[in-house]
């Protein structure tokens, strides 16, 4: 019953790697001379930063799917909501520098001939308020949604379907101009964040470091939860929900806790994503996006945390390379990867690799939380 | 609830039907505190369904289900009922396969159940000692750090009984504990249950007559959802109705 330590060998390696990346990537862009072998172009910094936010998003999905068996096919919605909350702040920060020069109203509102700021935009001029909303809006939605779903004991495929319906409904809502979030164009043309120019290399480097830090903290938080006794309860719920109930665990409460936490992590990922890609639009709510996240986790290895991180980076790296090369085939390649991994690497890349070479725990075989089939 | 006085578990005229099929039909049964009772009956008699009703998994259409003289169990769900002190071993052994044997017991130990409690919980010395005691009782000390999935069928049965002990409930409902066990294991299981009884109220469902005989307690025969006969094993074995519907087949 030796407890699984918060920082096991794999975690230390991962965090060390993350710190190294947070130093090397900005240096390679800011310090190395353009043209030298060590120089990293600015677009690559933003691209890698984006991967880190995807990794955090994948981590949030693994926390609920890998450890509690909740297959959310709507996690893109929480990511997008966090992104919109940050986007709203970035819009407000444009101030009078917009095309129409209105000191308060974002351009799209002036264009729609709105006279004043809708109430739900109030407060977003404050960075701290936006940060709070990045957590509270996805977290609040997940809490209400989860409370209704888990209390009615909606599980399995049915739960997955209603999470898809949720993100689809949000997408349709955000497409509407009169929702007040910029309709199908979404929010874009951001200028700066906290006074730093978003187009400058230093800001990009800063956002990269912030993304690395968020991923590291998200990972530690996920480790804290999954290595605790509550984490063991979550796995118990995943593998034998009825048993957990008959032992006196309030299963809904555990699901609700982890679902809400996971949605907040996804929201933070979205908030860091938006300034690095420069836009957030309703397409981020598309059901296909949410399915892709699940594929990242499956590819990397479900129920391992680091598998999700690895999967997000591998799949998105492949996507970047392929779409630059032959864009049309990406969706087929993604499908193929998923099928191949499911057939030949059911535990994902890290899961397969892990059983070969990571035997750090010696006799202890129960360390990882590989889901039962 | 005068009628339930002096009982630990009291079922009166309980009925439940699934799509018009009466799985439990006017079932009445009473267990005194500290009593052990064996329940036998043919397949489909409603033995498991009766346990489902007591533990809140199935809501009866009709009838009273009273625990500890005053608690109406039909108003509570599985979690509440488990916390009030009714533990259950399933017919198909159900343990947490991806947890170690020791962790299965840790999660079953009476006490911490809330989300924030378990998030912060550190294993205490008392908890560790209790786990060792139970491991010894269920003879799985050697398998402490193995995954429950790697246990044999009989060992899983024992682990699940160990989980019941860890829960330390007032009432234990034990559904077919000897299934899949060797004769020696079966007898050891009977001994174990006999030791538990007294402090706890125990209801055991079993098809194995040797096992029931070894328990040496009052037997209730269930058939088609109601009580067919009740008494010592010899008494019910001689009952012509029981012979016709169960033993004679
Ligand atoms: N949820 C349910 N839905 C429909 N029918 C059910 C349900 N649960 C039990 N039954 C039916 O009720 C009857 C009683 O089943 P139960 O499992 O209680 O029998 P049992 O006495 O435990 O039998 P066994 O000795 O085979 O375990 C069976 O005919 C079963 O098919
Ligand atoms: Mg049964």
Image: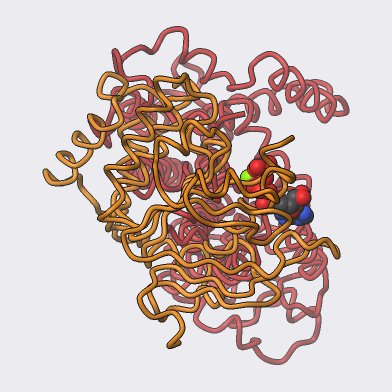
Q: Position of residue A67 (x, y in %)?
A: 50, 41
Residue B60 placement: quadrant = bottom right
Residue A82: in sight, yes or no? Answer: yes
The way the protein has been coloured in the rendering is by chain
- Which residue is most to the left? B125
- Which residue is most to the top? A356
Q: Residue at x 32, y 51 (%)?
A: B167
Q: Position of residue A54 (x, y in %)?
A: 57, 41
A128 vs A325: above or below: below
- Which residue is most to the bottom? A115
Image position of A358 (left or right of A347): left
Q: Chain B is drawn in which colour?
A: orange
Image position of A297 (left or right of A329): left
Q: Residue at x 30, y 27 (%)?
A: A16
Nearer-the-camera pick, A282 or B23: B23
Number of marks: 0
Q: Colour of chain A?
A: red
Nearer-the-camera pick, A261 or A322: A261
Residue B6 placement: quadrant = bottom left
Q: Where is residue B34 in the image (x, y as percent from the top left)?
A: 31, 59
Q: Quadrant of the N terminus of chain A?
A: top left
Nearer-the-camera pick, A32 or B230: B230
Q: Quadrant of the C terminus of chain A?
A: top right
Residue B92 placement: quadrant = top right
Nearer-the-camera pick, B249 or B171: B249
Residue A285: in sight, yes or no? Answer: no
Q: Which residue is drawn at 75% across and 22% down?
A: A322
A274 vs B79: above or below: above
Q: Position of residue A228 (x, y in %)?
A: 31, 45
């Amino acid at each position: 019953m030796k407890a699984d330590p918060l920082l096991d060998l794999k975690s230390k390696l991962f965090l060390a790697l993350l710190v190294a990346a947070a130093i090397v990537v900005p240096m390679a862009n800011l310090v190395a001379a353009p043209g030298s072998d060590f120089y990293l172009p600015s677009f690559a910094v933003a691209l890698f930063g984006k991967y880190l936010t995807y990794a955090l998003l994948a981590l949030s999905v693994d926390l609920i799917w890998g450890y509690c068996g909740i297959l959310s096919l709507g996690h893109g919605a929480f990511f997008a909501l966090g992104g919109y909350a940050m986007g709203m702040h970035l819009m407000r920060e444009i101030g009078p520098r917009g095309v129409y020069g209105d000191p308060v109203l974002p351009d799209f509102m002036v264009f729609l001939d709105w006279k004043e700021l809708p109430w739900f935009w109030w407060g977003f001029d404050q960075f701290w308020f936006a940060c709070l909303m990045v957590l509270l809006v996805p977290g609040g939605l997940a809490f209400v949604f989860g409370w209704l779903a888990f209390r009615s004991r909606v599980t399995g495929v049915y739960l997955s379907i209603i999470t898809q319906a949720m993100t689809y409904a949000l997408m349709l809502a955000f497409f509407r101009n009169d929702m007040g979030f910029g309709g199908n164009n979404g929010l874009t043309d951001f200028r700066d964040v906290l006074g730093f120019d978003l187009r400058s290399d230093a800001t990009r480097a800063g956002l990269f470091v912030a993304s690395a830090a968020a991923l590291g903290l998200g990972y530690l938080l996920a480790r804290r939860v999954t290595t605790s006794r509550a984490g063991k309860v979550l796995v118990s719920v995943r593998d034998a929900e009825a048993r957990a109930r008959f032992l006196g665990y309030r299963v809904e409460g555990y699901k609700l806790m982890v679902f809400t936490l996971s949605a907040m992590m996804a929201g933070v990922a979205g908030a860091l994503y938006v300034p690095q890609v420069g836009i957030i639009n309703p397409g981020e709510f598309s059901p296909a996006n949410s399915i892709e996240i699940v594929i990242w986790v499956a590819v990397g290895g479900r129920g391992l945390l680091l598998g999700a991180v690895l999967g997000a980076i591998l799949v998105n790296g492949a996507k970047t390379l392929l779409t630059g090369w032959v864009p049309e085939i990406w969706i087929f390649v993604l499908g193929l990867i998923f099928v191949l991994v499911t057939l030949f690497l059911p535990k994902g890349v890290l899961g397969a690799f892990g059983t070969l070479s990571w035997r750090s725990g010696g006799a202890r075989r129960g360390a990882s939380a590989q889901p039962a089939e | 609830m005068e009628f339930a006085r002096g009982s630990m578990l009291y079922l009166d005229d309980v009925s439940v039907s699934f799509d018009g099929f009466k799985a439990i039909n006017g079932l009445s049964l009473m267990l005194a505190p500290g009593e052990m009772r064996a329940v036998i009956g043919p397949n489909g008699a409603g033995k498991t369904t009766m346990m489902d009703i007591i533990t809140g998994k199935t809501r009866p259409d009709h009838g009273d289900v009273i625990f500890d003289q005053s608690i109406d169990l039909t108003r509570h769900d599985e979690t509440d009922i488990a916390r009030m002190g009714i533990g259950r071993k399933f017919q198909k052994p159900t343990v947490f396969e991806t947890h170690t044997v020791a962790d299965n017991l840790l999660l079953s130990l009476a006490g911490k159940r809330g989300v924030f409690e378990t998030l912060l919980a550190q294993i205490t010395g008392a908890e560790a000692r209790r786990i060792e005691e139970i491991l010894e009782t269920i003879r799985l000390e050697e398998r402490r750090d193995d995954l429950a999935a790697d246990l044999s069928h009989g060992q899983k049965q024992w682990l699940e009984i160990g989980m019941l002990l860890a829960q330390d409930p007032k009432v234990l409902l034990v559904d077919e504990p000897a299934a899949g066990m060797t004769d020696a294991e079966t007898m050891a299981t009977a001994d174990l249950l006999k030791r538990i009884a007294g402090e706890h109220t125990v209801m055991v469902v079993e098809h194995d007559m040797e096992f029931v005989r070894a328990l040496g307690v009052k037997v209730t025969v269930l058939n088609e959802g109601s009580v067919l006969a009740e008494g010592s094993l010899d008494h019910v074995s001689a009952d012509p109705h029981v012979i016709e519907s169960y033993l004679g087949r």
